Image: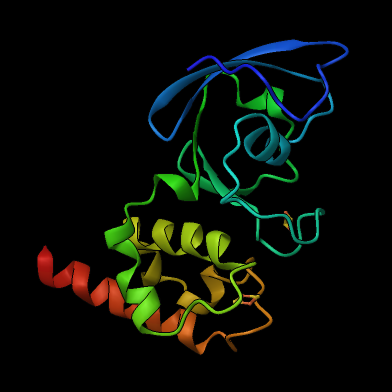
Amino acid sequence: MTTTGSPLPAPHSAIGIDFTLNGEPVSLSVSAAERLLDTLRERLRLTGTKEGCGEGECGSCTVWLDGLPVCACLVPSYQVRGRRVDTVEGVAPTRLAPYLASGATQCGACTPGVVMTAEWIRRHPTLLATHTVRELMAGNLCRCTGYDGIVNGIAAALDADRERA
Ligand code: FES
Ligand code: FES
């Protein structure tokens, strides 16, 4: 998709980038200092990715870059040229059921980032041979759930994945 119209100002020094977003090709111009978080939310209007701290501490802005979770508030948009970005909008709603059933979501500020890290764990369950779910989720802060709901939701999702395998 080629985008037009955006609440962000036209970039002063426009940098053209092409990348893959949730499996679809995207072409647009960004400014040199623009953050991936703002490109997603303001230029592409994908507002599922949230801003919390804006400095890489809370994980609310977690997206995948080439399959790895990153903080979109720390990634300059020009650096995604030629790469693959996945956001919470690309997660099938059916995959969210275990998180909802376990009370892993409350206020929702952290939820998109939590889901992106949780889904990354589900796709790489061998990580759990050397790390606990709590360790892998350490980059996602949540003020509401006490983390038990999140950990239980991921455990339930992993159990369901194993039963389906
Ligand atoms: S908003 Fe990016 S880590 Fe907090
Ligand atoms: S549900 Fe995570 S901060 Fe509220």
Which image quadrant is residue 157 in? bottom left
Pick the front one: 15 or 131: 15
Residue 20 at x, y percent in the picture: 46, 25
Which image quadrant is residue 78 in? top right
Question: Which quadrant contains ligand 2?
Answer: bottom right
Establish if 6 lies above or below 127. Answer: above
Residue 134 at x, y percent in the picture: 53, 78
| Residue at x-position 60% and y-position 50% | 49
Establish if 149 lies above or below 82. Answer: below
Establish if 151 lies above or below 34. Answer: below
Quarter of the picture containing the C terminus is: bottom left
Residue 35 at x, y percent in the picture: 75, 35
| Residue at x-position 75% and y-position 44% | 74
Which image quadrant is residue 33 in? top right
Q: Is residue 8 left or right of residue 62?
A: right
| Residue at x-position 70% and y-position 28% | 77
| Residue at x-position 35% and y-position 57% | 124
Residue 70 at x, y percent in the picture: 61, 48
The residue furthest right is: 12
